[in-house]
């Protein structure tokens, strides 16, 4: 059972899945939800992710951030993700 006052970071909180999770958690009484747009926090930026976690101390993380767009779109994305800034230490938040 998760404490309803626990600070929860919902990655991808503006997306289809993340926004639904956010609404559900809010409706269930979780009171300390935090989200960041990809402009505010690019999850491919390893140092920015560590800085965010050190500053905000989320106790729970829901990872619903992703680049979505079908197989052809993802073929190009997979390379940019794997070769982008910070990819040497990609952080898996799920
Ligand atoms: N939709 C479905 O029916 C469904 C079903 C099962 C599983 N899934 C999976 O759930 C995940 C999310 O899907 P979705 O449909 O919710 O996608 P979506 O609506 O396109 O939302 C993607 C979210 O990811 C964020 N994001 C993308 N790149 C980011 C980055 N570099 N740094 C930080 N945030 C980033 C976006 O943030 P911004 O808006 O701020 O850019 C947005 O909030 C995917 O893995 C998908 O395969 C989806």
Image: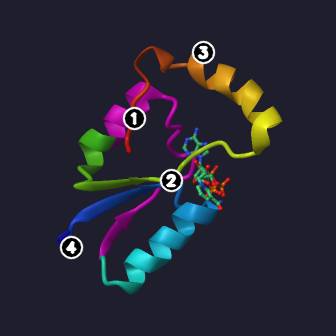
Residue 85 location, x and y as percent? 54, 19
Asked whether 35 falls inside the magenta stretch, the response is yes
Q: Please name the residue shown 35% across and 42% down the image.
A: 52
Residue shown at the point (30%, 77%) measured from the top left: 30
- In which quarter of the view is residue 89 placed? top left
Q: CA distance from mark 1 to mark 3?
A: 16 Å
Q: Secondary structure at mark 4?
A: loop
Looking at the image, residue 40 lies above or below residue 81: below
Q: Secondary structure at mark 2?
A: loop
Which segment did they paint magenta?
A: 31-52
Q: Secondary structure at mark 3?
A: helix
| Residue linked to disc 2 | 64
Task: Identify the residue under disc 4.
Answer: 5
User: Which tag, 4 or 2, sits closer to the chain's start?
Assistant: 4
Q: Earlier in the sequence, mark 3 or mark 2?
A: 2
| Residue matched to label 1 | 92
| Residue 34, percent from left and from top | 39, 61
Number of disc labels? 4
Left or right, 22 with reference to 94: right
Looking at the rendered image, the disc whose residue lies closer to the viewer, 1 or 4, is 1
* Residue 55: percent from left, percent from top: 27, 45
User: How far apart are the two marked residues, 4 and 2, measured between alpha carbons?
Assistant: 21 Å
How many residues crowd around disc 3 within 10 Å: few (fewer than 14), some, or many (20 or more)?
few
Label 3, on which residue?
A: 83
């Amino acid at each position: 059972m998760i404490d309803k006052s626990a600070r929860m970071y919902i990655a991808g909180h503006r997306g289809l899945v993340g926004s639904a999770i956010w609404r559900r958690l809010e409706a269930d009484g979780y009171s300390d939800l935090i989200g960041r747009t990809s402009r505010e926090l690019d999850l491919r930026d390893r140092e920015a992710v560590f800085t965010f976690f050190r500053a905000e101390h989320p106790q729970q993380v829901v990872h619903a951030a992703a680049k979505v767009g079908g197989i052809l779109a993802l073929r190009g994305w997979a390379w940019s993700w794997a070769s982008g800034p910070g990819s040497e230490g990609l952080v898996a938040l799920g």
